[in-house]
Image (cartoon, helix red, strand yellow):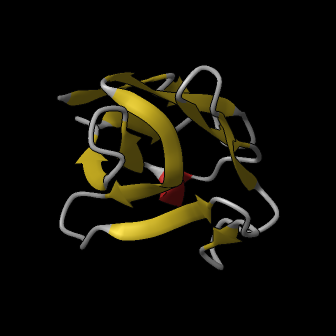
Amino acid sequence: QVHLVESGGGLVQPGGSLRLSCVASGSIHSLYAAAWYRQAPGNQRELVAAMSSGGSPTYADSVQGRFTISADNSKYTVYLEMNNLKPEDTAVYSCNVDAISETTMTINEYWGQGTQVTVSS
């Protein structure tokens, strides 16, 4: 079993920065791919940023140039660095990870519980 725990959300003023972390624990050989999604009240969940092994990160147009996704496979951790935050970035942010099982060497998908990001003055 694999668990994802996100942290780093909170209240920040417009123009501020936050760094979200998503730590995977359990029977993991390595991380294969990861993504961050967000969902604001009344809106559909949207893909914010994604990365995969050997590929270049991709970003939603609305966050391009402001957000950066990265991962540290030695710590089974995925990050989302968010700069120049805007009120419209307010949402619950969730991480999504494709992890290779340590025991079966198969790839399985996992979701975190989400962390609230609120951008307001």
Number of marks in the rendered image: 0
Q: Which of 42 and 92 is in front in this view?
A: 92
Task: State the image quarter where residue 44 is shown.
Answer: bottom left
Q: Quadrant of the N terminus?
A: top left
Q: Nearer the viewer, residue 61 or 21?
A: 21
Left or right: 1 with respect to 76?
left
**Residue located 26% across and 46% down the image:** 110
Left or right: 24 with respect to 60?
left
**Residue located 82% across and 64% down the image:** 65
Left or right: 33 with respect to 54?
left
In the rendering, at what x and y percent does residue 31 appear? 51, 43
In the rendering, at what x and y percent does residue 77 appear? 55, 28
Residue 95 visible here: no
**Residue located 26% across and 45% down the image:** 111
In the rendering, at what x and y percent does residue 88 appear? 50, 60
Q: Nearer the viewer, residue 67 or 43?
A: 67
Left or right: 26 with respect to 65?
left
Task: State the image quarter where residue 58 is shown.
Answer: bottom right
